[in-house]
Image: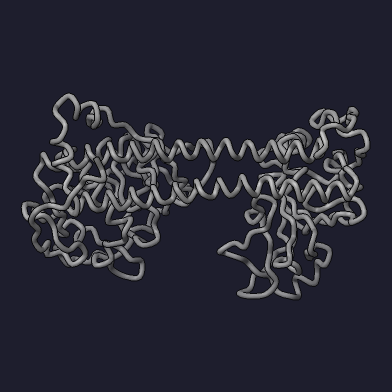
Amino acid sequence: MIADLKPYAEYKESGLPWLGDIPLHWEPTPNRAHLRIRKLPVGQRHPEYQLLSLTKRGVIVRDLSENRGKFSSDMGTSQEVRVGDLVFCLFDVPETPRTVGLSRHAGMITGAYTVMECADPKIARFFEAFYIAMDDRKLLSPLYSGLRNTIPKVRFLGAKTPLPPPDEQTAIVRFLDWADGRLERTIRAKRKVIALLNEQKQAIIHRAVTCGLDPSVPFKPSGIPWLGDIPQHWEVLPFMRLFAEVYRYPTYYDIQYVKSGVPEVRGEALVHGKIAVLPDQRYIDGETNSRFPRTILKEGDLVMSVRGTMGKIGVVGESHVGANITANLLRLSPRQEVAHPHYLSWLTRSPGFLRELDRVSPQTTIKTVTMPQLAGLRLCVPPLTEQTAIVDDVEKSIGRVNAAISRLAREIELLREYRTRLVADVVTGKLDVREALSACDAQAGAARMPDESEMGEQESLDEDEAMLEEPKEGEGADSLPIDEEDGS
């Protein structure tokens, strides 16, 4: 059905420089004709409300127990949101992950956002779809004002939105819900395959680093519950015996960062056994670096997180030689005659070892493992030549799995891009969905197209941690001077 969509028969100029042509029978209408700003501070009643956030998933209920993102210091300055309200972020528009969301929850949201109510719920859903499309393609720049790229409220209310007739709005919303559900199911199926491939990868790694490559060799009890039996010729050694040096960056030192200098490796850079280059790379000056020579990284070192998200580990490659580490990380230099760094990386990232780290660390709010606790751990160690063979075999095996995962991830990315383009083409009148809907009789249409009453909040496959960083009261559009220019 999607592939059969065609353009409308006739178009006209919309009069909107950021939109272009629209179908002949669509009418550009000032937003003020349908939207009204409503700001009702919750004040002392804030404990009665659930906290909401505007994210790429829409307006969601915030889980305060997760303790992620920023919160307003004064919840009383939050404003009420009702079911069916449109929530807009009209400041820092190019940078914000999402500009608009239709709330399907009652609650409160920070006062920096703009809450609008719509006289007709059906129009509200079309408005949401239209401005999501404008947001995705960043087409609202003619409405921006000032250094913060703000859309003044008066200007937004004066701006025009091209509206099809009411029955066509309903048809467009229903079609997009159906298409989105279909694409979402396809994406979800591919993500399930990715999850299975990741499980397969973990199984390959775990078996190789705990059992070796030859299943015919005799086994013996390791004496370590999470390891079980290991090849008879393997050794079990204390954790610290595997390393010539183990050093931690002093947590008490006040680091002064500079624009360029010695790169600092942080916990966020430890990804899949490697050290990534972060987009917000931080640098320390040479003098500071020279005060801590024991944590300067050498090729083949391991960097390990021992606080917060414990057990993250990365092998130092050529690009990070000479860098230093931040607090909460360890620099571990393997004994070259005993341990292969990549073998240790695979072994210490195995689920069993991570569970062991969790077991020995104190049950505090922020997990931390100490040197004595690490010293009490033991690992299985095959001969060095066998470690090298295991590393080579694992890298080849998981390389094939990773290639399959990458293909699926690219397919998901293309499906999302297609969904974004489809929504934009439909809500701006580039494609006509009426014929697709009329091709079905009432029963077939009901079976193929979801009814509005059946549409709930769909599970999203996007992660929007950035949008959990709530703007503070006084930092949003409300704190900026209003430009009274009418954007119509």
* Residue pictured at 88% horizontal, 50% vertical: 385
Picture quadrant of residue 247 = bottom right
What colour scheme has been applied to the protein in the rendered image? one colour
Numbered circles on residues, count: 0
Residue lying at the far left of the rendered structure:
25
Side of 181 where 354 appears, left or right: right
Side of 7 where 466 appears, left or right: right
- Above or below residue 223? Residue 18 is below
* Residue pictured at 12% horizontal, 65% vertical: 15
Side of 302 where 255 appears, left or right: left
Judge by depth and name the residue closer to the eye, 464 or 308. Answer: 464
* Residue pictured at 83% horizontal, 52% vertical: 340
* Quadrant in the picture for the C terminus: bottom left
* Quadrant in the picture for the N terminus: top left
Residue 32 visible? no
* Residue pictured at 32% horizontal, 31% vertical: 456
Q: Position of residue 126 (x, y in %)?
A: 20, 44
Residue 355 visible? yes
Picture quadrant of residue 51 = top left
Residue lying at the far top of the rendered structure:
443
Q: Position of residue 76 (x, y in %)?
A: 38, 43
Judge by depth and name the residue closer to the eye, 300 or 104. Answer: 300
Q: Position of residue 473 (x, y in %)?
A: 39, 53
Q: Position of residue 343 (x, y in %)?
A: 79, 48
Picture quadrant of residue 439 = top left
